[in-house]
Image (spheres, rainbow, N blue to C red):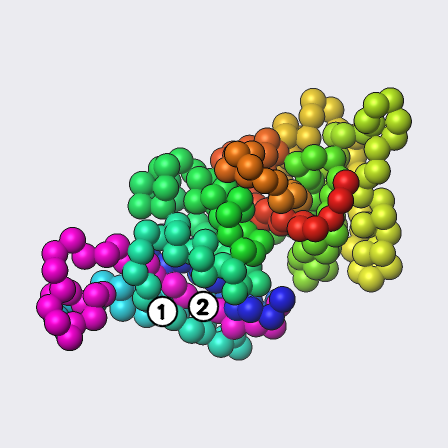
Amino acid sequence: MSGPVLVGVDGSATSLAAVEAAAREADRLGVALRLTHARPWPTAPVPRGVAPWEPGGIGSSGPANGALAEAERRACNAAPGVRVMHTVLMGEPATVLATESRRASLTVVGSRPTSRFGSGRRGSLAARLAAHGGSPVLMVRGEPDPAGPVVLACDDGDIGRRAAEFAFAEASAHATDVVVLNGFRSRNGRPQDGPHDALAALREKYRDVTVRRPRVRGGTRRAVIEASTHAQLVVIGTRCRSGWTAAVPATVSRAALRNAGCPVAVIRDEGESR
């Protein structure tokens, strides 16, 4: 997908950290960076001829402009060659980002727990975007180990191609290994289709990336959280679900988004069968 990398901007420290990460991702993907600030609809009537984001008249959007200007400065410092766009949109921030993510290559968010973005728990915005957004989601959190690997895991035992491709590309860009954590070894007494097919082609494409598959004890969820304390990035592959289950993030991705010690990417594989 050639859409921009989308990042929400609210002026907070975690938002600015997300902007810097988003700029680097846009540079890696060769696409533009789109800084988006969401404003709630005004509760008072807006005078005729006045834009809804400036209900008090010209200049009332100063805080938004200031936040976007600082975000653009941070983005240019992080990735000088990236083309930066910015916009102010009306609506609840999580809903705005979910809608705008349909035209994005990647959506990046910070980890600040705030009621502005949903339930107020860490990972809640990213979980909502992972379930209902239109692009892969990267949540910037924790303290990534610059010498650590990229950890690749999954929600249901079958790592999809999009998640594996994202993990290998990140590992190649950062000259590190991919550690595959898969605690789902069998189904109905028979060996389950694992990530081998998805990884085989990627091993050929990314010959500079070493793949490690340590034995998983105690389940994938626990293994991912433990591995995240000395990793650069955790990548979780998940699948589209329908009905009421689509509103509930799966176990591994939910745990990673709430508790990982480094940034977490949730990559949804659509249209693949088990």
Q: Is residue 62 above or below residue 193?
A: below
Q: Nearer the viewer, residue 249 or 252?
A: 249
* Start-end of magenta stretch: 29-56
In the image, residue 136 lies at what x, y percent? 58, 54
The answer to whether 57 is drawn above or below residue 40 in the figure is below
Real-space Cα separation, disc 1 to disc 2, in angstroms: 8 Å
Answer with the quarter of the image where residue 98 lies.
Answer: bottom left
Residue 92: x and y, percent?
32, 51
- Point out residue 5 in the picture as x, y percentages from the top left corner: 52, 64
Q: Residue at x 31, y 41 (%)?
A: 115
Rate crowding at label 1 as few (under 14), some (14 to 19) or many (20 or more) other CA atoms within 10 Å: few
Can residue 36 be found in the magenta stretch? yes
Residue ID for mark 2: 34
The residue that label 1 is drawn on is 87
Which element carries disc 2, helix, strand or loop?
strand
Q: Is residue 179 left or right of residue 235?
A: right
Residue type, numbered disc 2: Arg
**Label 1 vs 2, first from the N-terminus:** 2
Q: Is residue 112 magenta?
A: no
